[in-house]
Image (cartoon, rainbow, N blue to C red):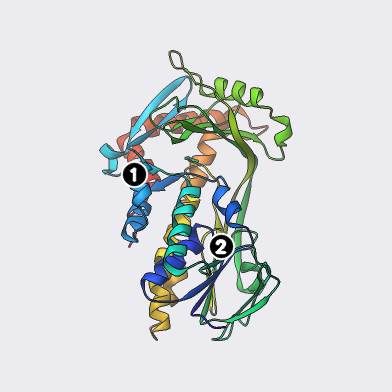
Amino acid sequence: MRTQVGIVGAGPAGLLLSHLLALRGIDSVLIEIRSREYCEARQRAGLLEQGTVKLLRDAGLADRLDRQGIEHGGIYLQFAGERRHLDFVDLTGRTVTIYAQTEVVKDIIARRLADAGSDAIQFSVTDTQIEDIDTDKPKLRYITPDGVGHEVTCDVIAGCDGFHGICRPAIPADALTITEREYPYSWLGILADVAPSTDELIYSHHPHGFALHTLRTPTISRLYLQVGKDDDIANWPDERIWAELQQRLALPGWTLHEGPVLEKAISPMRSFVSTPMRYGRLFLAGDATHIVPATGAKGLNLALSDVAHLAPALDALLHGQPALADAYSETCLQRVWRSTHFSWWMTTMLHRTPGADDMEAQLQLSQLRYVTTSRAAATSLAENYTGMPLP
Ligand code: DHB
């Protein structure tokens, strides 16, 4: 079999890439080791930068996003017993939109299957391999659930298969520079069947550690707690989660409403950048090549930004014009490093490092006071949070 672009991974990056390429008349084969059900159920972040919303709208993927997304014009930062509002619209003229990653995934899967038929995405494949990435005929191999082995000769391969995928490790280790930091804490996230207790997100600095109140819909809340790096979800019965959220988000005169916990999980916090984002005819996008800690919700936005650059670059490359493809890595890395810095900065401003001295807390409180009282500092946060415009 032959295709123009072999795409590994049907997360947001791989899915959007296959759609953007199809709009340009370019065929792709998209393979995924997980089932469709798994991809559509996996809970991730849910905050879209203004540029990401525009990208999805311009690609004709925003019907449901425009109906169900919840536009927010700011956030609250809570610290030292006070809750301060930052008004992004006033500061930057930009907003963000609450719309879960799983919903973005469902929307693109539905669109690809409607446009290109049930073979458009090969779910639940096994034994995936990529070969010959340093030639102009790289190959994708995999076995479909019916047991049939496939070999697809491609013009290029796009590795959109996440941090634990096969594509980045296919590049010789000495061709990559990896810059990495692990944080000494994790996030416990819950989805709760209760109306949000707030109109906009609350990021809370607290002596017990960070907490975040976000939301999914007018009747579903999402909340996060900083927990130990190697903490086990078994240590966190629902009552303990709510008790900790009640303490870390408490404000006189305000009530956090509790409800049934629909799902809960712990995720690690890591900053990771692997460069370059291309090797020969293999192009990497999203978590396959960079990871940010969750604070600020940049992961999904960065992944979609990568493929917004990759689609036109591959289109040009396949038509004999390599300049955009040659610039792909450098172009994306500008934004990747900006978001890596912002995510690190938000994370270290808001979390309690286990065993830290009082200097850490006082410096964090000073910084929080600064970003909530100086228009210049608030504008810097707002500009990064809402995201720079995409091309
Ligand atoms: C969400 C996650 C984040 O990490 C964040 O900073 C804001 C929102 C979310 O899941 O809604």
- Residue 331 visible in the displayed image: no
Which amino acid lies under the numbered mark 1 shown in the image of this protein? Arg
- Residue 219 lies, with reference to residue 382, above or below; the image says above
User: Tag 1: Cα neighbours inside 10 Å, few (<14), some, or many (≥20)?
Assistant: few
Q: CA distance from mark 1 to mark 2?
A: 32 Å
Tell me the number on the disc at residue 240: none
Q: Secondary structure at mark 2?
A: loop
The residue under label 1 is: 67
For the residue pair 30 and 215, the one nearer the viewer reads as 30
- Residue 191 visible in the displayed image: yes
Quarter containing the C terminus = bottom left
Which amino acid lies under the numbered mark 2 shown in the image of this protein? Thr
Q: Is mark 1 within 8 Å of ligand 1?
A: no
Quarter containing the N terminus = bottom right
* Residue under the image location 42 percent in, 73 percent down: 327
* Residue under the image location 55 percent in, 26 percent down: 206
Residue 266, horizontal then vertical, whole percent: 64, 40
- Would you identify the image quadrant in which residue 147 lies? bottom right
For the residue pair 260 and 101, the one nearer the viewer reads as 260
Residue 375, horizontal then vertical, whole percent: 30, 35
Q: Earlier in the sequence, mark 1 or mark 2?
A: 1
User: Tag 2: Cα neighbours inside 10 Å, few (<14), some, or many (≥20)?
Assistant: many
The residue under label 2 is: 289
Residue 250, horizontal then vertical, whole percent: 51, 19
In the displayed image of the protein, which residue is found farthest to the top? 253
* Residue under the image location 34 percent in, 29 percent down: 373
Residue 330, horizontal then vertical, whole percent: 45, 68
- Residue 256 lies, with reference to residue 319, above or below; the image says above
- Would you identify the image quadrant in which residue 224 lies? top right
